[in-house]
Structure formats: C-alpha cells, structure tokens
Image (tube, helix red, strand yellow):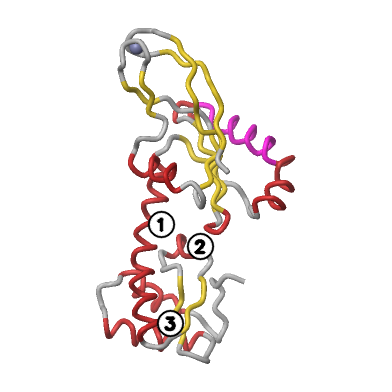
Amino acid sequence: MSTKGAFRVECPHCGESFDADFWTVVRGDRDLDVKELILSGEFDILMCPKCETMFQHEEPFLYLDPPRELLVFVMPETYLEKKDEWVARMKADYEPLRATLASSHGVAGEPQFFFGLAPLTALLAGDRDREEETEVLEFMAREAGMQLLRIKPSAAREHDLPFLLPLPSGLKGRAAALSAVRELEKANDALPRLKKLGIALAALKGEDIPFLNK
Ligand SMILES: [Zn+2]
C-alpha cells in the first residue's frame, strides 16, 4: 500500500512552519485516488494552517505500478541542479531494496528517475489515453470473436501501441495478428495506436511478436 511520511515545511506566504504529510510511496495500481491527484495536479498541494494559503511542496517519492512496469523515483524539480548526484544516490538506495521489491511487490526491471511531477503526469496521462483506446479495441475484438494478448506496457509506451493485441480465435503469430488488426481497422479507422500496431507488425520479420508479455 501507499505510505506517508511527515516533513517540516515553511509557508512561502507568511513564513509559518508546520508538519505536513507527504506520500513517500504511491502504489499507482492500488490507490487510484492518489493516482488521480497526480493526474489532476493536486498532489503535494498544502494549505498553511495559519494564513490558509495553498502552495505546492515537493518531496521525493517512489511511484510503483508493477503490472504497468513502473518503478519511478520522483524527485523535486529543484534537485535537477544536482541531477547526477541524486540519481547516483537513488540508485544506491534502490540496490538493497531491489530483492524485497521484487519478491513482495512484484516489481522488476530498472527504475526510472524523474525530476518534478510533470514527466510522471505526462506518462500517466499517456497511459490513460492508451487505456481508453485499448478498451475500444478490446470491445471490438470481442464482438468479432477474437482473442487478446497483453503487450508489454514498456513496449506499448515506447512504440505508442495499445496495451492489447488482437488475434483471430485459435491462431497465433505475426501474420494472424496483422490480419486481425486490418479487420478492426476496417471497422474503425479512428484508432491511432491500432494503426501503429499494424505498422509495427508489418515491419517485423518472421512470426515472432517480440513486444508481447511473456
Ligand atoms: Zn502561511
């Protein structure tokens, strides 16, 4: 689950100093309301108890979403001045945690390092769009009696693909997937990521589809 820590902050308006709670770990796949705060720009917004001014205050936190292959150290934007130093420190902090995160949270792979909330917000907003398009694709594929396989989330982001790959029922391999994509495209040509999936499949050699989840 997500966890919080308390830090002392100072109001930029009246100078009052007070303790505030901050998320230190956010589980994007479980705490959808916290994820929503990031998407809406309300994450880490504080209110001064004395003058009631609202202001943003960033503290480092870890954003985890194992099914989506996300393990992101989010540091305050001001840390960018000493970027290399911070990345080295976070990597060193991560090493002893690697085994625990893998066994208890199913987190594998290499961490990403972001400075400020903007890159995380952009990534999550991109995923949300991808998810919406994937839902349309999934509905159409099921209507057509097709089966669906999971595309690796990291590959879906890298190549801007949907999260699912359609296949004619009972078939597998690249050529079959491409024919399923072409059939769905005929029914709906307003799905940009479906189009990119068709282009990616057409560019591959052989029957193997490397971007599928193992
Ligand atoms: Zn204040």
State how far apart marks 1 and 2 are (Cα).
Answer: 9 Å
Q: Foreground mark, 3 or 2?
A: 2
Q: Which mark is residue 109?
A: none
Q: Which residue is mark 2?
A: 153
Lower sequence index among marks 1 and 2: 1
First in sequence, mark 1 or 3: give its number: 1
Indicate yes or no whether the magenta region holds residue 198.
Answer: no
Alpha carbon of mark 3 to alpha carbon of mark 2: how far?
20 Å
Residue placed furthest toward the top:
15
Q: Which residues are magenta?
A: 81-94
Q: Residue at x 40, y 8 (%)?
A: 16
Q: Quadrant of residue 109?
A: bottom right
Q: Quadrant of residue 50?
A: top left
Please tell me which residue is depicted at 53% across the width and 83% down the height of the picture: 205
The amino acid beneath tag 2 is Pro
Q: Helix, strand, or loop for circle 1?
A: helix
Q: Are marks 1 and 2 in contact (CB under 8 Å)?
A: yes
| Residue type of the residue flagged with mark 3 | Ala
Q: Give coordinates of residue 105: x percent, y percent.
A: 65, 51
Q: Secondary structure at mark 2?
A: helix
Q: Main secondary structure of the magenta part?
A: helix
The quadrant of the rendering that contains the C terminus is bottom right
Which residue is label 3 attached to?
Answer: 202
Return the disc, 3 or 2, that comes first in the chain's sequence.
2
Label 1 CA crowd tier, 10 Å (few <14, some 14–19, many 20+): some
Task: Identify the element where label 3 is drawn.
Answer: helix
- 173 displayed left or right of 179: right
Give the camera-side residue of 2 and 186.
2
Give the residue displayed 34% in from the left and 80% down from the top: 140
